[in-house]
Image (cartoon, rainbow, N blue to C red):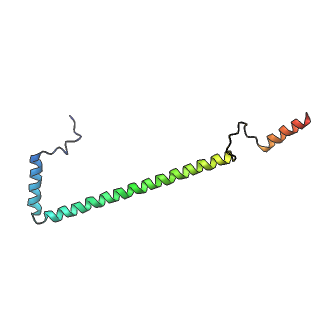
Amino acid sequence: MDYTLLFFDFGTGEIFIIIMMIFLVFGPSKIPELAKKIGRGVYEVKRASNEIKREIDSEVRRIEREVDLKKTVENKQEDPQGSVSKEPKQNKDQSSETNSTKSDN
């Protein structure tokens, strides 16, 4: 048996009984005021939710820009002329040894 949506499975009769109970508890004069307060509450929750979404989106965009900038800087540091070098990089000790062996020959 599927119990996932049984809580929200209201029929016409149940809705009618709920509305009648609201009339009996609050009275017809308080219902518009109550509906107005509920509407304001729903609006505030929706506004806060949208504000949180905007904050998260702006932070994600900022982080993506930082990552892209960091990758660009790293790529520029690896190859400042913009051309791809096919030879592996050598440190100064290795290159001086290579030059001294060439001059000895």
Count of all numbered marks drawn on residues in the image:
0
Q: Position of residue 51 (x, y in %)?
A: 37, 58
In this rendering, the answer to whether 45 lies above or below 72 is below
Q: In which quarter of the image is the C terminus?
A: top right
Q: Which residue is drawn at 9% across and 51% down?
A: 16
Q: Position of residue 82 (x, y in %)?
A: 67, 45
- The residue sitting at the right extreme is 104
Q: In which quarter of the image is the N terminus?
A: top left
104 sits left or right of 92 in the view:
right
Q: Residue at x 72, y 37 (%)?
A: 88
86 sits left or right of 34 in the view:
right
Q: Residue at x 47, y 55 (%)?
A: 59
Q: Which of 1 and 16 is in front in this view?
A: 16
95 sits left or right of 75 in the view:
right
In this rendering, the answer to whether 61 lies above or below 97 is below
Q: Position of residue 14 (x, y in %)?
A: 11, 48
Quadrant of residue 32 in the image? bottom left
Q: Which residue is drawn at 51% across and 50% down?
A: 64
